[in-house]
Image (cartoon, rainbow, N blue to C red):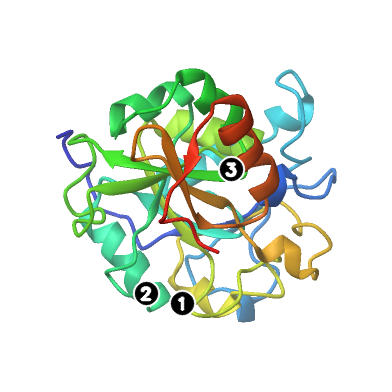
């Protein structure tokens, strides 16, 4: 097992609204990094960073160069990730506990793990599918559930031998994961049982006082349509030759087509209706 990262100074988690549903990015804008616009929106110490540009910009773009401050701030606090999500170090017991307490989430409900590269999947999982299959689905709006390896921290989902892996298709988040250099635990930025969040300013503001950092990448989709709240499609690939749909999510049709037609995997009895 890899050693746990130091937890000192990690207040809880980071929230991000970066438009990852169906691989989409936040709205384009010239943008700037800023502090919370109103004391009513954040407790002292909480910070809001608005991304210049969006996640679709190219590597050499000046907009992407403007991400530097946000990347450094996120890594210094607790890294952020996912569709209006909360994220923390997956190797820090205190940070993991803080996320559960913040959301009011049952400790029996697992957190997914955010990685930066397909190659990292082999370090943290027992992979039973071809590498080409991973590359066809990742990065993208899919969570792949596989048997975990001993590299993951013992306090991350200790009640299950499986783990969900996410590599969202968003340039800022890919940069963030690579800069952080380790797995990130993630979940949606909302209280448990409430709807997923699509907008930093209009939703999950009750969580702001408990967060180290909020990163605003623009509203997700139109900020209203229910389909944008579906989240990633969650697929169980822990059994060789089979797949199970745990959550249909936003990419069900394209994902099942790849699994069945291209790789010949069979649906398992564990698939949801």
User: Residue 194's spot in the image, x, y percent?
Assistant: 55, 80
- Helix, strand or loop under label 3: helix
- Helix, strand or loop under label 1: loop
The 10 Å Cα crowd at callout 1, few under 14, some 14 to 19, many 20 or more, is some
The 10 Å Cα crowd at callout 3, few under 14, some 14 to 19, many 20 or more, is many
User: Residue 47's spot in the image, x, y percent?
Assistant: 55, 60
Question: 172 and 74: which one is in front?
Answer: 172
Q: Residue at x 76, y 34 (%)?
A: 56
Label 3 and label 1: CA atoms lie apart by 27 Å
The quarter of the displayed image where residue 87 is located: bottom left
User: Residue 139's spot in the image, x, y percent?
Assistant: 59, 33
Label 2 and label 1: CA atoms lie apart by 5 Å
With 154 as the anchor, is 20 left or right in this view? right
Q: Which residue is mark 1?
A: 192
Question: 36 and 225: which one is in front?
Answer: 225
With 5 as the anchor, is 145 left or right in this view? right
* Dot placed on the residue nearer the N-terminal end, 2 or 1: 2
Q: Residue at x 34, y 66 (%)?
A: 109
Q: Which residue is mark 3?
A: 70
The 10 Å Cα crowd at callout 2, few under 14, some 14 to 19, many 20 or more, is some
The quarter of the displayed image where residue 102 is located: bottom left
- Helix, strand or loop under label 2: loop
* Dot placed on the residue nearer the N-terminal end, 3 or 2: 3
Q: Residue at x 39, y 26 (%)?
A: 120
Label 3 and label 2: CA atoms lie apart by 28 Å
Q: Are marks 2 and 1 in contact (CB under 8 Å)?
A: yes
Q: Which quadrant, please, contains the N terminus? A: top left
* Residue 11 shows in the view: yes
Q: Residue at x 38, y 29 (%)?
A: 121
User: Residue 158's spot in the image, x, y percent?
Assistant: 19, 56
* Residue 80 shows in the view: no
Disc number for residue 105? 2
């Amino acid at each position: 097992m890899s050693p746990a990262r130091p937890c000192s100074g990690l207040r809880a988690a980071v929230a991000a609204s970066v438009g990852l549903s169906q691989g989409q990015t936040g709205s384009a804008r010239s943008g700037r990094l800023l502090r919370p616009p109103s004391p009513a929106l954040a407790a002292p110490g909480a910070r809001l960073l608005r991304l210049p540009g969006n996640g679709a910009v190219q590597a050499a773009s000046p907009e992407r160069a403007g991400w530097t401050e946000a990347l450094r701030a996120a890594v210094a606090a607790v890294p952020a990730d996912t569709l209006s999500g909360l994220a923390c170090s997956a190797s820090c017991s205190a940070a993991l506990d803080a996320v559960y307490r913040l959301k009011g989430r049952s400790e029996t409900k697992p957190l997914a793990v955010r990685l930066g590269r397909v190659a990292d999947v082999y370090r943290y999982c027992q992979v039973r599918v071809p590498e080409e299959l991973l590359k066809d689905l990742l990065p993208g709006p899919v969570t792949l559930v596989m048997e975990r390896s001993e590299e993951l921290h013992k306090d991350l989902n200790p009640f299950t031998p499986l783990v969900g892996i996410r590599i969202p298709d968003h340039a800022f988040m890919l940069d963030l994961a690579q800069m952080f250099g380790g797995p990130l635990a993630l979940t949606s930025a909302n209280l448990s049982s409430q709807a997923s969040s699509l907008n930093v300013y209009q939703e999950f503001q009750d969580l702001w006082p408990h967060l180290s950092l909020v990163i605003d990448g623009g509203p997700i989709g139109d900020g209203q349509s229910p389909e944008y709240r579906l989240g990633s499609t969650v697929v169980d690939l822990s059994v060789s030759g089979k797949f199970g749909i745990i959550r249909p999510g936003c990419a069900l049709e394209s994902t099942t087509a790849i699994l069945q037609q291209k790789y010949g995997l069979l649906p398992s009895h564990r698939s949801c209706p």
